[in-house]
Image: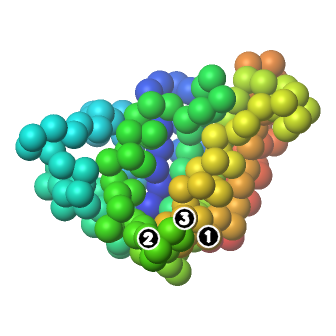
């Protein structure tokens, strides 16, 4: 299987980075794995529309050609990111805005969207600092938005959704237990 890991955290000493390393070290070598570290790649998340940059041409933007090629190549996507202020990091939002373009990732048939990336699956792994019960009942989780309003619209089925809540108040034992869960997931790919 071709696996593309899309990672969006700027700190190489973060718990998200430990998640990335756990995945990387436990995915079978029988799979082909690529890692897209948006911060390390200095991805420009700013979406520009002007005389030279038309919305209708976004699907053909040469600046994102390699990123679209990676999505086409992948059978399975794994997103790793923190939830900040109820949303994903701006760099990941910009990646979605610029790469998951109409005419490449989806189109409309009448008023209904049709996904142009069918047959692909995804996993979403998020962390946040909110207690789990509070986040579940009182906040919109952008991991769920990514699953339902982006990936599904593009024809991608999210089959795994893993959340580590209340990261700031977690101890090493809880973090190790979560990393064991990530390891088990990776071993089953």
Q: Locate residue 158: give its quadrant.
A: bottom right
Q: Which residue is mark 3?
A: 153
Query: Tag 3's secondary structure?
Result: helix
For marks 1 and 3, give the one nearer the viewer: 3
Percent of width and height locating residue 72: 35, 71
Residue in view at x 60 percent, y 33 percent: 87
Residue ID at (45%, 31%)? 90
Instruction: Determine whether the residue tagged by mark 1 lies in a helix, strand or loop.
Output: strand
Q: What residue would you read off at disc 1?
A: 157
Observer able to see residue 115: no
For the point 74% across and 19% down, the residue is 168
Q: Where residue 77 appears, x then y in whole percent?
A: 51, 62
The secondary structure type at the circle numbered 2 is: strand
Q: Position of residue 67 (x, y in %)?
A: 29, 56
Task: Locate residue 61: give its quadrant.
Answer: bottom left
Q: Nearer the viewer, residue 91 or 48?
A: 48
Give me the residue at 25% from left, 50% from top: 55
Q: CA distance from mark 3 to mark 2?
A: 10 Å
Q: Tell me if mark 1 has few (under 14), some (14-19) or many (20+) residues whose alpha carbon lies within 10 angstroms of its own.
A: many
């Amino acid at each position: 299987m071709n696996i593309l890991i899309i990672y969006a955290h700027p700190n190489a000493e973060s718990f998200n980075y430990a998640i990335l390393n756990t995945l990387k070290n436990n995915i079978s070598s029988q799979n082909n794995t690529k890692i897209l570290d948006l911060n390390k790649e200095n991805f420009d998340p700013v979406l520009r529309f002007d005389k030279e940059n038309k919305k209708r041409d976004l699907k053909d933007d040469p600046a994102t050609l390699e990123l679209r090629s990676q999505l086409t190549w992948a059978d399975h996507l794994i997103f790793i990111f923190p939830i900040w202020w109820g949303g994903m990091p701006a760099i990941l939002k910009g990646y979605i805005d610029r790469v998951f373009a109409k005419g490449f990732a989806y189109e409309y048939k009448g008023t209904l969207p049709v996904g142009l990336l069918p047959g692909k699956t995804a996993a979403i792994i998020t962390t946040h600092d909110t207690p789990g019960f509070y986040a579940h009942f009182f906040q919109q989780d952008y991991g769920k938005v990514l699953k339902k309003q982006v990936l599904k619209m593009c024809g991608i089925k999210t089959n795994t959704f893993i959340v580590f809540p209340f990261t700031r108040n977690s101890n090493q034992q809880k973090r190790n237990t979560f990393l064991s869960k990530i390891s088990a997931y990776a071993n089953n790919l």
